[in-house]
Image: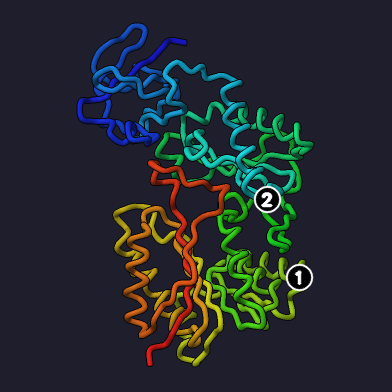
């Protein structure tokens, strides 16, 4: 393979020098490879190739993979400019990722690879019992996905874990930015794509083929557990319930009654099935509603709840839409605060990277003022440890989760 080196412009590369993982297209000045040496231009290097990255003064920054269709032009694999990127390299990265999970979370179902936070950019791998679900959003990593899956299966086998099937959920629109087609299907032999898992003592049917994202939101694992202690004997409202995870945690903890709502009929069907699976159908029920329409209706009816849970989808996936997203977050939080009885609890979160901690917290301050309540913070949480937050790579920090006691102003 021809060696390829890119050199950044003077004054560029501050992010990567400070520990970031990405090089953007407008930061590159110079390209050196067999048969070409000169100003950087596309089409000279094969898309997906390994490249060495150097600062304008030739300082070594690392080795990465190039994606010529993306504004994120290079994603680093390692800071070692002399590293050999072969099977042993990927084995080392995957082994480190697995050992980290074994030390920090219940690995029966967990995220094993979280992209850049595991130094394997643009690839996500979730494990649901004996099934793996993979998502690839980066051209450079696309060519390595089956290689990575094969090595990971070997590593898991060393711990006696035999993977019966792998399903790919690379159907995000983000792939189009990389010049990749959206892909969904089996990698290897076909298998039953409904998988039964247990988390926090709650049983779930997980649909890895047609469920949201990779089938189940593993990142809220510890946050769901944290809400259990609030719910015993309580009346609970769970908004944007998806397949019922927070509602079922409330039920298993002994809630008197739980209502879970979501706009997706298929999600509500799965949630109802999950309630039956856990023997909770008498206390936990699910209904299909648009939350933005339901909350004001509940308020008009004079309803109130001991615990209100707001776990909405990402209202914003870009900086440009943050302002409108903030309005959406504010609307549901004002309603949620008003529906929480005096002394009750509000659990509220955002899963958007672009809705930063500062923006989310300010929105909650403003919402409390407009709702006429006082918020007493119980705790602040983020995503579970199998979705590690990598300092200096801001995109890895996306989930913000607050638990408040709601005190009505007198």
In the rendered view, would you say 339 is above or below 183? below
Task: For the residues labelled 2 and 1, say whether their Cβ atoms are less than 8 Å apart.
Answer: no
At horizontal 49% and vertical 34% (from top left) the residue drawn is 119
Element at badge 1?
helix
Q: What number is the disc on residue 332? A: none
The location of residue 320, given as percent across then percent down, is 29, 55
Alpha carbon distance from label 2 to label 1: 24 Å
Q: Quadrant of residue 62?
A: top left
The location of residue 262, given as percent across then percent down, is 55, 70
In the rendered view, would you say 349 is above or below 213? below
Q: Quadrant of the C terminus?
A: bottom left
Q: Badge 1: how crowded within 10 Å, few (<14), some, or many (20+)? A: some
The location of residue 283, given as percent across then percent down, is 70, 80
At horizontal 60% and vertical 58% (from top left) the residue drawn is 221
Farthest residue, direction top = 35
Q: Nearer the viewer, residue 131 or 222?
A: 222
Name the residue that disc number 2 marks. 106
In the rendered view, would you say 236 is above or below 54? below
Element at badge 2?
loop
The location of residue 231, given as percent across then percent down, is 62, 77
| N-term mark: 2 or 1 | 2
Nearer the viewer's eye, disc 2 or disc 1?
2
At horizontal 32% and vertical 64% (from top left) the residue drawn is 324
In the rendered view, would you say 94 is above or below 347? above
Left or right placement of residue 194 versus residue 287 in this view: right
At horizontal 35% and vertical 20% (from top left) the residue drawn is 60
Name the residue that disc number 1 marks. 276
Farthest residue, direction left = 10
Q: Nearer the viewer, residue 267 or 17?
A: 17
Q: Badge 2: how crowded within 10 Å, few (<14), some, or many (20+)? A: few
């Amino acid at each position: 393979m021809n060696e390829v080196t890119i050199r950044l412009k003077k004054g560029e590369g501050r992010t990567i020098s400070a520990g970031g993982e990405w090089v953007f297209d407008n930061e590159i000045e110079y390209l050196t490879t067999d048969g070409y040496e000169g100003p950087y231009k596309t089409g000279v290097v094969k898309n997906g190739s390994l490249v060495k990255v150097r600062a304008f003064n030739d300082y070594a920054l690392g080795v990465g993979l190039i994606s010529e269709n993306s504004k994120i032009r290079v994603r680093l694999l390692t800071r070692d400019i002399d590293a050999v990127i072969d099977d042993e390299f990927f084995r080392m990265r995957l082994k480190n990722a697995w050992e980290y999970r074994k030390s920090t979370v219940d690995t029966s179902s967990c995220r094993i690879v979280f992209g850049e936070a595991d130094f394997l950019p643009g690839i996500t791998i979730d494990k649901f019992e004996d099934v793996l679900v993979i998502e690839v959003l980066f051209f450079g990593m696309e060519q390595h996905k089956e290689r990575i899956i094969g090595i990971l299966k070997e590593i898991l086998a060393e711990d006696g874990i035999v993977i019966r099937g792998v399903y790919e959920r690379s159907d995000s629109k983000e792939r189009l930015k990389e010049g990749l087609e959206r892909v969904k299907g089996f990698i290897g032999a076909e298998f039953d794509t409904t998988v039964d898992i247990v988390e926090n003592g709650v049983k779930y049917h997980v649909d890895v083929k047609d469920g949201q994202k990779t089938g189940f939101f593993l990142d809220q694992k510890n946050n769901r557990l944290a809400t259990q202690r609030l719910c015993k004997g309580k009346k609970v409202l769970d908004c944007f319930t998806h397949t019922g995870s927070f509602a079922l945690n409330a039920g298993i903890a002994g809630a008197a009654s739980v209502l879970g709502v979501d706009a997706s009929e298929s999600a509500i069907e799965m949630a109802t099935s999950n309630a039956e699976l856990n023997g909770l159908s008498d206390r936990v029920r699910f209904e299909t509603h648009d939350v933005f329409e339901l909350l004001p209706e509940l308020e008009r009816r004079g309803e109130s709840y001991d615990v209100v849970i707001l776990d909405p989808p990402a209202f914003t996936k870009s900086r440009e839409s943050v302002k409108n997203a903030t309005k959406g977050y504010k609307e549901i939080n004002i309603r949620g605060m008003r529906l929480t009885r005096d002394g009750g609890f509000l659990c509220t979160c955002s899963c958007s990277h672009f809705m930063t901690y500062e923006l989310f917290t300010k929105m909650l301050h403003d919402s409390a003022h407009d709702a006429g309540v006082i918020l007493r913070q119980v705790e602040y949480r983020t995503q579970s440890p199998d979705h590690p937050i990598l300092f200096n790579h801001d995109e890895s920090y996306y989930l913000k989760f607050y638990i408040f006691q709601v005190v009505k102003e007198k």
